[in-house]
Every structure is written in structure tokens, then in C-alpha cells.
Amino acid sequence: MDRTPRGELTIRVQAMPKDTNPSGDVFGGWILSQMDIAGGVFCKQIAMGRVVTIAIDSTQFRLPVFIADTLCCYVNFVKQGRTSITVHIEAWVNREFDKEEIILVTEGEFTFVKVDEDRNPTPIED
């Protein structure tokens, strides 16, 4: 794949042995949780308040992530509704042995909703 990440680099984290299955591959759930955290950080800035995940759509796992890979999550704004924000998130890795190469491993669309202190949806101010 000959392309570069789309969006803003929002988080970077290294995959550790505790994040893997017995075969040494990082769990897909760990990757999704990192993407979810990145999306939440990004959307909280737009909403200027607390946001919660309400949907994860069209997620595609392209390649495995291994111990010591640095997972980089890039978030790209897609659309905003009255209370919601949809973003496209790409997870790329730098392999431990090749710090120059970055590889797309997972991508998907996430939707977040701004909520008040009682966890009820609340409008996003312009």
C-alpha cells in the first residue's frame, strides 16, 4: 500500500506482551480500544465536553500487530450532527526493526455522542 496516514496523529502506544494471544499476535480488541481512545480524545476537543462511543462501523483488520510495534492512531473528521461526531480512524504501526516504515493495520469509522453529567445526549455548540 503506497499511501500516508489521513488525519491527525492522536495517540501513539507500544504493543506489549500482555496485549497478545498465545501465538504472539496483538488482540484485535486491544487495537480497537486504542482507536476508541484516540477518537474520544479527538472528539472531546470538538464537542468541548464529554463524549461516548455509540457506534463502530466498517472496521477492517488488514495486518497483524506484534509485540514492540508502535501503534499510531490517526483521526480524520467525517461529519457532525446535532449531538454526534463521526470520525475515520486509521491505526498504523512502526515495526521495531524498521522505524522508517509505517504500515496501515486497521481502519474504521467511529461515532461519538456528546453527553451531559447525567449521560444524556446534549447538543454540540458551534
Image (spheres, rainbow, N blue to C red):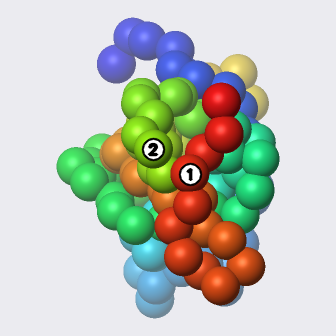
Residue at figure coordinates x 56%, y 51% from the top left: 123
Query: What amino acid is labelled 2 in the image?
Result: Arg
Amino acid, disc 1:
Pro
99, 92: nearer the viewer = 92
Label 2 sits on residue? 82
The quarter in which the N terminus is drawn is top left
In this view of the protein, which residue sits in the foreground, 31 or 93? 31
**Distance Cα–Cα, label 2 vs label 1:** 5 Å
Q: Quadrant of the C terminus?
A: top right
Q: x and y percent of residue 115 in the render?
A: 61, 68
Q: Are marks 2 and 1 in contact (CB under 8 Å)?
A: yes
Residue 76 seen in this snapshot: yes
Q: Position of residue 73 (x, y in %)?
A: 61, 43
Q: Give the structural element (helix, strand or loop) at label 1.
A: loop
User: In the rendered view, does 87 fall on the left or right side of 34?
Assistant: left
Residue drawn at x 60%, y 45% as measured from the top left: 124
Mark number displayed over residue 123: 1
The image quadrant that residue 67 belongs to is: bottom right
Above or below, 89 against 15 in this view is above
